Amino acid sequence: MRDIPELSTAPWRASSYSNTNGGECVEVADGYPGIVPVRDSKNPADPALLLRAPAWTSFVDSLKHGA
């Protein structure tokens, strides 16, 4: 990816499977056409991973089907 979006004010949301203690979970940011920013909720200041939308969809589908 050539253009890295500014994520300091990104609307991060936690996984629906995360616990209420803010423990181990993945957060994603919506609103970035074609990419899905992903970060570790325990280390929000660390760089986010930027995944192309089709790769994210394949990843989530794999999890849903037990892969």
Image (cartoon, grey):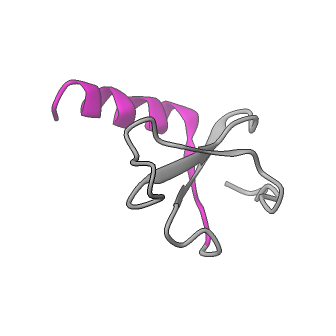
Q: Is residue 55 left or right of residue 2?
A: left
Q: In this view, does 8 lie to the left or right of 67?
A: right
Q: Residue 61, position in %: x, y?
A: 33, 26
Q: Image quarter for residue 60? A: top left
Q: Residue 35, position in %: x, y?
A: 64, 41
Q: Residue 25, position in %: x, y?
A: 42, 54
User: What segment is highlighted magenta in the picture?
Assistant: 47-67
51 w.r.t. 3: above or below:
above
Question: Residue drawn at (45%, 49%), measured in percent from left and top?
Answer: 20
Q: Nearer the viewer, residue 17 or 62?
A: 17
Question: Residue drawn at (77%, 51%), measured in percent from left and top?
Answer: 10
Q: Is residue 24 left or right of residue 47?
A: left
Q: Image quarter for residue 4? A: bottom right
Q: Residue 8, position in %: x, y?
A: 81, 63
Question: Residue drawn at (54%, 73%), measured in percent from left and top?
Answer: 43
Residue 10 inside the magenta-drawn segment: no
Q: Nearer the viewer, residue 45 or 24?
A: 24
Q: Image quarter for residue 34? A: top right
Q: Residue furthest left?
A: 66
42 w.r.t. 17: above or below:
below
Which of the image's four quarters has the C terminus?
top left
Q: In this view, does 64 lie to the left or right of 37?
A: left
Q: Nearer the viewer, residue 17 or 4?
A: 17
